Structures are given as structure tokens and as C-alpha cells.
Amino acid sequence: MSSFQSELNTGLDAVRQAAAVCRSVQASISADSLEKKDKSPVTVADFASQALICRTLQQTFPDDPVIGEEGAEELRADSGATFLDRIVQECGAVGVASNGSEVCDWIDRGGLQEYRPRFWTLDPIDGTKGFLRKDQYAISLALIVDGQIQVGILGCPNMPVDESNPDGQRGLLAWAVKGQGSFLQALDAPDSEPKKIQVTETADSADARFCESVESGHSSHDWSGQIAAKLGITREPFRIDSQCKYLAVAKGDADIYLRLPTRKGYQEKIWDHAGGILVVEEAGGTVTDIHGKPPEFSHGPTLAKNEGMVVTNGRFHDAVTSAVAVSAPVR
Ligand SMILES: Nc1ncnc2c1ncn2[C@@H]1O[C@H](COP(=O)(O)O)[C@@H](O)[C@H]1OP(=O)(O)O
Ligand SMILES: [Mg+2]
Ligand SMILES: [Mg+2]
Ligand SMILES: [Mg+2]
């Protein structure tokens, strides 16, 4: 078996199962809970997704630690009992019978806080705001060995299977193993032939389409506007939530993804990037932080030595980081 095949297959199974839970919970969000800005659906889905993925990883790789976004502390408190019941129910709905204490133990398998030579990192729902708006979100899982991302997986349950038909079938699963390319499959067609994906061949940055966060609190829209002007970009930004932006670049729907810090001192979390980065790099793209430095996955849960992120198809990466530098606001 070629390298990391077992890790990849286990990760793909885990992400498919988590996607089923996320979809079922997202479908239950009512207009009423949207109106009330009720955050409980995303809380239930976040925890259930992390529980199921950590459970699957534990079964196949019992010695592998996980740096996951969530922890079960609040669920173990008396005030968490109602949530915990709902999470147990959601796990049951995808065929995983459990009880509250098991679910909490699975979630807390994601509690590694420091660097290890081999670990997984998991964002059980990336883009919680998109999830609540019934829009885009991602499930991101990656395996890091000696500081290098070796396996990256993105589950994107709401991404259109055919970009030209946004109202058609939805749900994509993308993955990459280092050195083996990036692949894409419809989430609901696990037996279909995976399609190799490639970034665009756009050579002039002025022709580029860039994507960025919907939320201006997560990535500065003012700054990206100035960068676009410097690069001569006239196309409107493609705003989507979550690591779906990495997928958009990897499969050629966009040429650039900018993540620009809104304040000094924010440390990006490794689970917000690891899965997406490998999928872009193996599709031929380039990823650095805003200073042109490669992301460093050897400092625990955050990218402590990096700031923001710049993702391109690799044709004009230095021009983009230069435009970022010359237009940097005083922070
Ligand atoms: N101040 C912030 N700056 C950057 N990212 C943030 C900030 N606050 C939350 N996030 C995280 O940004 C990501 C969403 O980014 P985007 O806006 O591109 O969809 C999520 O990982 C979200 O966490 P979460 O995983 O809880 O949703
Ligand atoms: Mg996230
Ligand atoms: Mg998250
Ligand atoms: Mg969160």
C-alpha cells in the first residue's frame, strides 16, 4: 500500500460520517432559530462531529493524539446535560450507539495542547457562522508528521458538485496526500472515480478572482480591497465561509485566497488551515503567511510564528505578498 493510504481511508470514512451528522443538524435549523440567532444547532453538530471523528481515529490509530478545536468540559458539567443528550441522539442517528460519558471521552481525545512528532488536527465544523446561515462550512482533518502535513481532508457538505449549477447536487469531499496530488469526489458518491484537481493557470494577477471570508471580523475587507487595487484586480471578491475557500482555489474556481489579520496578535489556529493547505499545494498552488513565510505546524494549536495567510495558484504569489506588504494598515 502506498504511503499514508490507511490514514487517508480512515480519515475519509470519519469525515463522511461527520458530514452526515452536520447535514442532519443543519437541516433542522428553523427560520425561528435563525431569527433568534440560536447557536445551539452548531454547538450540537460541532461536538457530534468531533466525537465521531475522534472515535474513528481512535479505533484505527489508538496511539495518535489529536489537536481538535472542541473540548468536552462544558458538556460534563450539569448544565451541559441537555446538549449531551442531543449529541448522543445525533450520533445514534448515523448508527453510532453511545452514552454521554463515551461521547465526552471521544471529544476529549482531541485535547492535545502541544507539539508531537505525529498528530492529527481537526476542525469539526469550520465556518460556524456559515453553518448557522445554512450556507458554506467545512470539516477539516489533517495528519502532521515531523511538522509536515502528510494528509489533508476537506469535507464541504454544501459546495455545489457542479460549479455552473449552484442549485443542483451539493456536497464535495477533497483530499491530498503529500506528493500524490489532490482529488475530489461528490460526498454522496464514495465509490465514484476521484477526479484530480488543479489550480487555475491564470498568469496575470489583474485577471485574478480572489476569495475571502464573508465575515470582515475574520479577515479585513478594507485591506483586501487595497491589495486588489494594487494588483489591478477588477473582479468582485468571492466571499464564502470556511476552508471551502481553499477548495475554491484548489479546484480552480478562484485564483487567490486572502486571510488578512484584523488585529495585531491574533494567532491563526492550525485546524483552520492544515487540511486546506495540503489540498491547495497538491493541486499546484502556493501557500504562505502574509509575510511570505511557510506556515509552521510545530508550535501546538496555533500558527504562533505566522500571521494571516496568502493562497495563490502559484503564478504570481510574490506579487500578491508584496501588494499585501505595501498596503498594510497600521495595526
Ligand atoms: N477573529 C478571528 N480572526 C480570524 N479567524 C477567526 C476569528 N474568530 C473566529 N475565527 C475562525 O475563523 C474561521 C472562519 O473563517 P471564515 O470567516 O473564513 O469562514 C473559523 O475557524 C472561525 O472559527 P470556527 O471554526 O469556530 O468557525
Ligand atoms: Mg475553524
Ligand atoms: Mg470550528
Ligand atoms: Mg469555533
Image (cartoon, grey):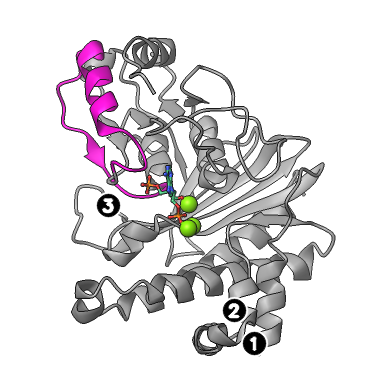
Crowdedness near tag 1: few (<14), some (14–19) or many (≥20) residues, C-alpha within 10 Å: some
- Residue at image location 85% in from the left, 60% down from the top: 63
Decide if residue 119 is on the left or right side of residue 9.
Answer: right
- Residue at image location 19% in from the left, 77% down from the top: 31
- What residue is pinned by disc 2? 75
Contact (Cβ within 8 Å) of mark 1 with mark 2: yes
Magenta stretch encompasses residue 233: yes
Q: Nearer the viewer, residue 6 or 43?
A: 43
Magenta stretch encompasses residue 305: no
Where is residue 95 shown, x and y percent of the image? 57, 86
- Helix, strand or loop under label 3: loop
Q: Compare marks 3 and 1 and give the one earlier in the sequence.
A: 1
Disc number for residue 162 = 3
Where 121 sits versus 270, above or below? Answer: below
Residue type (three-letter) at the residue carrying disc 3: Asp
Disc number for residue 100 = 1
Residue type (three-letter) at the residue carrying disc 2: Leu
Where is residue 37 shown, x and y percent of the image? 27, 70
Q: Is residue 23 visible?
A: no
- Residue at image location 42% in from the left, 40% down from the top: 246
Contact (Cβ within 8 Å) of mark 2 with mark 3: no
Q: Compare marks 1 and 2 and give the one earlier in the sequence.
A: 2
- Which segment is the magenta one? 216-243
Where is residue 34 shown, x and y percent of the image? 23, 72
